Image (cartoon, rainbow, N blue to C red):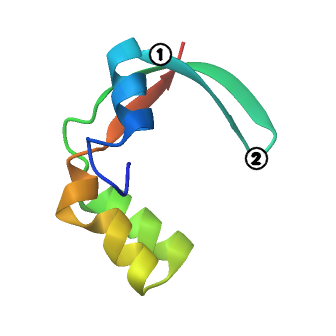
Amino acid sequence: RSVHGPGASWFRTLREAGEGHIQAGGVSRDVVVEPAVDPGLDLDSAYRETYGGGRPLRAITGPLAVRATLKITPS
């Protein structure tokens, strides 16, 4: 998700390319990206569990960010 919505430059670039590379938690992978069909409550719950509450949670679960949710699949 892009907290700044679908207009964020990194989000637009990644979505247009349809592929990228991620590194997180010691894992490094090439990935394919596509718009998430149903970003829904499961993802919001995971964010809530990770970030607790407050402003960061409201930003990442807000309507602008939800519209900028990608599905990431290892390539």
Q: Which of marks 1 and 2 is in front?
A: 1
The residue located at (26%, 62%) in the rendering is: 41
Residue 61, horizontal then vertical, whole percent: 30, 66
In this view, 68 is above or below 42: above
Which residue is disc 2 drawn over? 25
Which type of secondary structure does the marked residue at label 2 adopt? loop
Which type of secondary structure does the marked residue at label 1 adopt? strand
- Report the amino acid beneath label 2: Gly
- Report the amino acid beneath label 1: Glu
The residue located at (40%, 24%) in the rendering is: 13
Q: Residues within 10 Å of mark 1 (few under 14, many from 20)?
A: some
The residue located at (39%, 36%) in the rendering is: 9
Q: How many labels does the image show?
A: 2
Residue 25, horizontal then vertical, whole percent: 76, 46
Left or right: 63, with 51 as reference point: left
Outermost residue to the bottom: 54
Residue 51, horizontal then vertical, whole percent: 52, 75
Q: Which tag, 1 or 2, sits closer to the chain's start?
A: 1
Left or right: 75, with 29 as reference point: left
Left or right: 19, with 28 as reference point: left
**Residue nearest the viewer, comparing 11 with 52:** 11
In this view, 7 is above or below 17: below
In this view, 74 is above or below 63: above
Q: In which quarter of the image is the C terminus?
A: top right
Residue 45 position by quadrant: bottom left
Residues at marks 1 and 2, CA–CA distance in whole angstroms: 20 Å
Which residue is disc 1 drawn over? 19
**Residue nearest the viewer, comparing 17 with 8:** 8
Outermost residue to the right: 26
The residue located at (33%, 17%) in the rendering is: 16
Residue 66 position by quadrant: bottom left
Badge number at residue 10: none
